Amino acid sequence: CCIESTNMNFKLFDTLDFLVKHPAKDIFVSASGDIVWKHEANGTCSLGIKLTSMDKGIKSELLDFAYDLWLEKNLQTISSQ
């Protein structure tokens, strides 16, 4: 996943513990991951995070949600060509 922050003090391979807001429910889910890439620009820091810990059921729900959005966007792009 990708996280944006105004904090620039992150280092590659650091482990982060963070909360993810579930897009379809009013809950936050705890997760952990390792920083695998970092990009700084315009006062923000984008971090690529390799997830190492998250509830498997919630992770599956989030991936399904993201896939459905991706599929909807790409089907619209294909149908408009």
Image (spheres, helix red, strand yellow):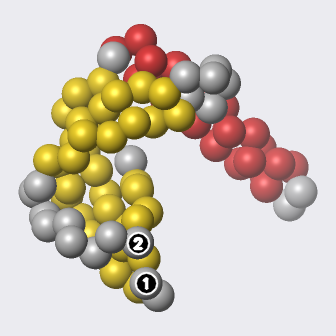
Indicate whether 60 appears above or below 73.
Answer: above
At x 47% / y 87%, what residue is drawn?
42
At x 33% / y 17%, what residue is drawn?
55
Q: Secondary structure at mark 1?
A: loop
Q: Is residue 62 visible?
A: no
Left or right of 54 on screen, residue 35: left
Answer with the quarter of the image where residue 23 lies: top right
Indicate whether 43 appears above or below 4.
Answer: below
Which residue is identified by label 1?
A: 43
Instruction: Pinpoint residue 35: horizontal percent, then vertical percent.
Output: 20, 55
Which residue is identified by label 2?
A: 6
CA–CA distance in space, label 2 to label 1: 6 Å
Answer with the quarter of the image where residue 32 lies: top left
At x 34% / y 28%, what residue is drawn?
30
**Given the image, on which type of amino acid does mark 1 rest?**
Gly
Instruction: Pinpoint residue 49: horizontal percent, then vertical percent.
Output: 28, 50
Instruction: Pinpoint residue 1: horizontal percent, then vertical percent.
Output: 38, 48
Indicate whether 51 appears above or below 81.
Answer: above
Task: Give residue 74's mark.
Answer: none
Name of the residue lying farthest toward the bottom: 42
Name of the residue lying farthest toward the left: 13
Question: Is the residue under label 1 in contact with that under label 2 (CB below 8 Å)?
Answer: yes
Q: Nearer the viewer, residue 29 or 35?
A: 29
Q: Nearer the viewer, residue 37 or 18?
A: 18
